[in-house]
């Protein structure tokens, strides 16, 4: 089984308890960040890694939004949530590493806690760059590896355990990956120490 299959299956497995497991983080901080990020969205928008649809309640009503996930069981939860909330969103089973969208069609692309688990983050980021319009905006809330010596090392040590259970890495170097794919105009705001970041990318092509 390749890495993409493995991670997809892990998210299928945790889909039933995902909302429960995330609840403490949701109450402490995530909800606030979701509200903040979704408020900024305009025009034709792509949500990557929609998961169980935790951002759906906050989608503005006047945007044209499509959201994708490669875990069909996480996606099913998002579909239920959108129905319950009567939110208009196109939910598609798709892998960010090989998207079926044409080039340059989205004004905004956004992610919340997704690039910790995309199996090949460089591939995924290149695809986002491709589908986002020139001068479009990419907004990401992502947790990353700490640059602090001891904490970063602990994250490296415990990472295999977390990936095995959950599918998410706690030691991703997402900022470095973003630069590797050629994005040059980036704003980074630390939200929780140097671990959770809001990253805004201006898609200059
Ligand atoms: C930690 S969850 C976050 C879900 C949601 N964004 C949130 O804020 O609650 C990560 C999600 O990204 C999805 N994901 C990971 N890799 C993906 C990929 N290559 N393509 C599409 N979705 C992916 C997983 O299936 C999972 O639903």
Image: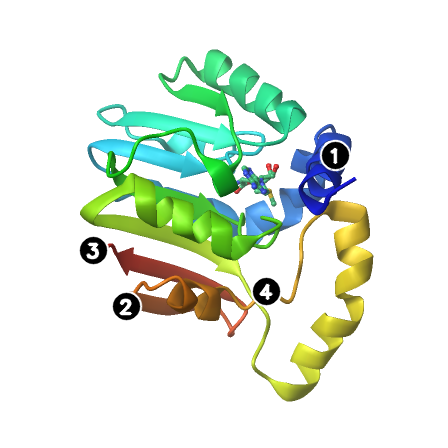
Q: Secondary structure at mark 2?
A: loop
Residue 171, compared with residue 4, is above or below; it is below
The quarter of the rendering in which ligand 1 is drawn is: top right
Give the label, 4 or 3, closer to the camera: 3
Q: Which residue is label 4 attached to?
A: 172
Q: Which residue is label 3 attached to?
A: 205
Question: Residue 119, image x and y in percent?
Answer: 62, 50
Q: CA distance from mark 4 to mark 1?
A: 20 Å
Q: CA distance from mark 3 to mark 1?
A: 35 Å
Residue 59, compared with residue 4, is above or below; it is above
Give the label, 2 or 3, closer to the camera: 3
Q: Callout 2: 10 Å neighbours few (<14), some, many (20+)? A: some
Question: Residue 155, image x and y in percent?
Answer: 71, 71
Q: Which residue is label 1 attached to?
A: 9
Is disc 2 in contact with disc 3, using a CB cutoff of under 8 Å? Answer: no
Q: Is residue 155 visible?
A: yes
Q: What residue do we see at 18% from left, 48% from top?
A: 134
Residue 187 located left or right of residue 120: left
Mark 4 vs 1, N-terminal side: 1
Q: CA distance from mark 2 to mark 3?
A: 10 Å
Colour scheme shown:
rainbow
């Amino acid at each position: 089984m390749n890495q993409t299959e493995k991670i997809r299956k892990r998210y299928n497995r945790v889909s039933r308890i995902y909302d429960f497991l995330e609840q403490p983080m949701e109450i402490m901080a995530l909800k606030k960040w979701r509200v903040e990020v979704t408020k900024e969205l305009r025009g034709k928008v792509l949500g990557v890694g929609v998961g169980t649809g935790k951002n759906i309640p906050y989608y503005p009503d006047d945007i044209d939004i499509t959201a994708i996930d490669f875990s069909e069981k996480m996606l099913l939860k998002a579909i239920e949530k959108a129905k319950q909330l009567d939110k208009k969103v196109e939910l598609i089973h798709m892998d960010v590493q090989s998207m079926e969208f044409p080039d340059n069609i989205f004004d905004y692309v956004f992610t919340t806690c997704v690039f910790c688990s995309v199996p090949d983050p460089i591939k995924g980021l290149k695809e986002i760059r491709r589908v986002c319009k020139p001068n479009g905006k990419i907004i990401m809330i992502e947790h990353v590896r700490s640059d602090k010596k001891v904490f970063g090392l602990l994250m490296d040590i415990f990472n295999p355990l977390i990936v095995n259970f959950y599918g998410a890495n706690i030691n991703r170097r997402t900022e470095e990956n973003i630069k590797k794919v050629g994005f040059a105009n980036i704003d980074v705001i630390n939200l929780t120490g140097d671990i959770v970041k809001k990253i805004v990318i201006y898609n200059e092509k």
